[in-house]
Amino acid sequence: MTGKNGRKTAGIIFFMLVFVAAGHSPGEEQAMSNRLKEIESLFNNFNSKTLHLADEFYDPDVVFQDPIVELKGRDRLKAYYADMYENVTSIRFDFSGGIEKDEEAVVFWTMEVRAKGFKGGEPVLLDGSSHIKFGGESGKAVYHRDYFDMGAFVYENIPVLGSIVRYTKKRLSKHGQE
């Protein structure tokens, strides 16, 4: 296996060994990317007018948690989202990657949201991640937890409070530079 064809063959064998060692077949890799695409599609198509998408994605007994609330049940989750999206004029998620193993996925995102009465309707950016587990009889999402900095999302975007939070963070960051 020397020369151009030998390197190509060695590369293909290496690729196959990596997949076998990781317990994946090439078809399984495609299914994993489809799962991540499904998550991305839900996040970017979900809003106050498309709450029915929750029925297609979430198990009826889903457990949901974020820095604000922890709840159980798809109907309660839909009510929470309906309330949350009430003043949202636009929302978009840019995904920077994801990890999937078995029936779990973690996705990393930046959300850009505009809402009436919040920061004058200007866009607010928020980095976060979501951990989602699939299973149960439905094969749908049975667990969804969002991780993000609540201070960066809300507190820093309230005029007076925001300046205090940003000032405090700046002062504290100086301690890490010493």
Image (cartoon, rainbow, N blue to C red):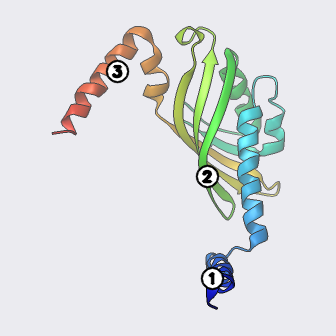
Q: CA distance from mark 3 to mark 1?
A: 56 Å
Which residue is located at x 70 percent, y 51 percent?
36
Amino acid type assigned to the residue bearing label 1 in the image: Arg
Which residue is located at x 79 percent, y 56 percent?
139
Judge left or right: residue 169 versus residue 6.
left
Task: Identify which residue, 97 or 8, lies in the foreground.
Answer: 8
Eye-nearest disc, 1 or 2: 1
Quarter of the view holding residue 104: bottom right
Residue 67 in view (yes/no): no
Eye-nearest disc, 3 or 1: 1
Which residue is located at x 48 percent, y 21 percent?
154
Which of the labelled discs sits on residue 165, or is there none?
A: 3
Location of the N terminus by quadrant is: bottom right
> Horizontal and vertical percent for residue 40?
71, 43
Contact? badges 3 and 1 (CB < 8 Å):
no
Amino acid type assigned to the residue bearing label 3 in the image: Val
Which residue carries the number 1 mark?
A: 7
Which residue carries the number 2 mark?
A: 98
Dot 3, how many residues are within 10 Å of its Cα: few (below 14), some (14-19), or many (20+)? some
Q: Look at the numbered disc 2 and give the secondary structure of its residue.
A: strand
Q: CA distance from mark 1 to mark 2?
A: 30 Å
Judge left or right: residue 134 versus residue 155.
right
Position of residue 78 relative to residue 16, above or below, is above
Q: Earlier in the sequence, mark 2 or mark 3?
A: 2
Amino acid type assigned to the residue bearing label 2 in the image: Gly
